[in-house]
């Protein structure tokens, strides 16, 4: 489901607000989130990300390792805490800590300061050597699964996470995707109870068919980025990465869409507003539906949040 994947904000900006009406993979063009957008995990450890400095110069953070290795590559469970480690071919080490007692998985989680319930650190050798840490409201990370045992895999994405040098050397932005396997386990994560819709159940009385939400004037925090996001998203959806997904690179479409946030300079206020809509629609059960039913559900239960964003 797009809204519970790394494309959360993009899907919301494009679908919930009706900014784009083009067919994406698995979609009908009516705006509902296609059900096949969440990448399925594979039995490997892989990171495909980028770090951009203040000048816009980008450094690749990519690497792959067959088996998980604690503190270097993979995942670990300690109590209710999920630890993630990713090491690139150039020696960059990214560490993620998420306490699922506060952030049940799967979810898009707001990243905060070090030692908060969700934070990121990065040790980098090039191009700006040093240790970089997340601060309050630094961005978000998406975890698409809730692993329960050693050997299980998960996928996820960095949603433009701002990291600041501990030595005062500046700020960088981390974006990209990852696929990791769980290694050491000494506890259990808190997982969301997800009710899967029955296949081929057909229309029922529980499927939303009505509901309206007059968006009024365009004066919310996401309004200034509407045209840019629409154009960027349309380009991604029309690209071969989304129209003809390559099994060897399942993250290509997601990576393209994630890049639209940075390309359009989307503010943190807009990202926070999009997250509020995402949370409301998730709590209302809208993700169980697609297309018109998804839109109707959002209009019925989350109109205030949608208006606040746009």
Image: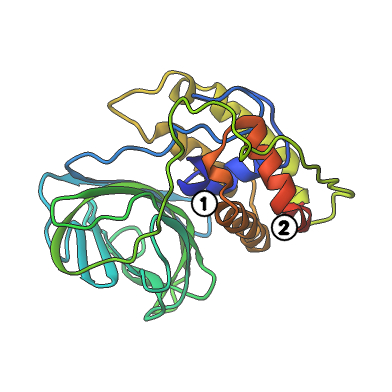
Q: Nearer the viewer, residue 243 or 227?
A: 243
Residue 195 coordinates in the image, percent (x, y): 43, 47
Q: Tell me which label, 1 or 2, sits earlier in the chain.
A: 1
Q: Is residue 179 left or right of residue 20?
A: left
Q: Quadrant of residue 141?
A: bottom left
Q: Inspect this view and state whether residue 61 appears.
A: no
Tell me the number on the disc at residue 305: 2
Q: Is residue 59 left or right of residue 232?
A: left
Residue 267 coordinates in the image, percent (x, y): 65, 58
Query: Going by the picture, which residue comes out furthest to the front?
Result: 205
Q: Nearer the viewer, mark 1 or mark 2?
A: 2
Q: Is residue 12 above or below residue 277?
A: above
Q: Is residue 218 above or below residue 304?
A: above
Residue 101 coordinates in the image, percent (x, y): 37, 73
**1 and 2 marks in contact (CB < 8 Å):** no
Asked which secondary structure carries label 1, the reply is: loop
Residue 178 coordinates in the image, percent (x, y): 31, 47
The total number of labels drawn is 2
Q: Residue at x 55, y 29 (%)?
A: 236
Q: Residue at x 69, y 26 (%)?
A: 21
Tell me the number on the disc at residue 5: none
Q: Is residue 80 left or right of residue 25?
A: left
Q: Is residue 257 left or right of residue 158?
A: right
Q: Nearer the viewer, residue 187 or 23?
A: 187
Q: Decide: few, some or many residues near mark 2? Use Cα within 10 Å; few <14, some 14-19, many ≥20.
A: many
- In the picture of the structure, the residue carrying the numbered disc 1 is 56
Q: Residue at x 67, y 57 (%)?
A: 270
Q: Inspect this view and state whether residue 171 appears.
A: yes
Asked which secondary structure carries label 2, the reply is: helix
Q: Quadrant of residue 192?
A: bottom left
């Amino acid at each position: 489901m797009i809204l519970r994947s790394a494309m959360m904000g993009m899907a919301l900006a494009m679908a919930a607000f009706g900014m784009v009406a083009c067919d994406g993979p698995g979609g009908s063009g009516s705006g509902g989130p296609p059900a096949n957008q969440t990448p399925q995990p594979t039995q490997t450890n892989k990171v495909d990300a980028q770090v951009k400095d203040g000048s816009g110069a980008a450094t690749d953070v990519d690497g792959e390792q067959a088996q998980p290795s604690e503190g270097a590559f993979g995942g670990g469970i300690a109590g209710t805490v999920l630890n993630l480690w990713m090491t690139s071919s150039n020696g960059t080490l990214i560490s993620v800590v998420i306490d699922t007692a506060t952030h049940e998985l799967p979810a898009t989680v707001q990243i905060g300061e070090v030692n908060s319930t969700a934070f990121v650190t990065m040790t980098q050798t090039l191009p700006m050597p040093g240790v970089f840490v997340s601060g309050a409201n630094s961005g978000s990370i998406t975890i698409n699964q809730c692993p329960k045992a050693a050997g299980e895999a998960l996928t996820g994405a960095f949603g433009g996470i701002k990291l600041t040098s501990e030595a005062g050397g500046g700020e960088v932005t981390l974006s990209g995707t990852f696929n990791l396997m769980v290694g050491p386990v000494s506890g259990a994560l808190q997982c969301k109870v997800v009710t899967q819709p029955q296949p081929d159940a057909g229309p029922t009385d529980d499927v939303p068919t009505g509901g309206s939400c007059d968006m009024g004037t365009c004066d919310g925090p996401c309004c200034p980025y509407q045209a840019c996001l629409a154009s960027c998203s349309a380009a991604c959806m029309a690209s071969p990465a989304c129209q003809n997904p390559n099994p060897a690179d399942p993250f290509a479409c997601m990576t393209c869409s994630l890049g639209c946030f940075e390309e359009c300079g989307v503010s943190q206020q807009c990202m926070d507003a999009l997250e509020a809509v995402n949370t409301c629609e998730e709590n209302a059960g809208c993700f169980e539906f697609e297309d018109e039913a998804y839109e109707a559900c959002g209009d019925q239960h989350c109109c205030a949040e949608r208006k606040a964003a746009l």
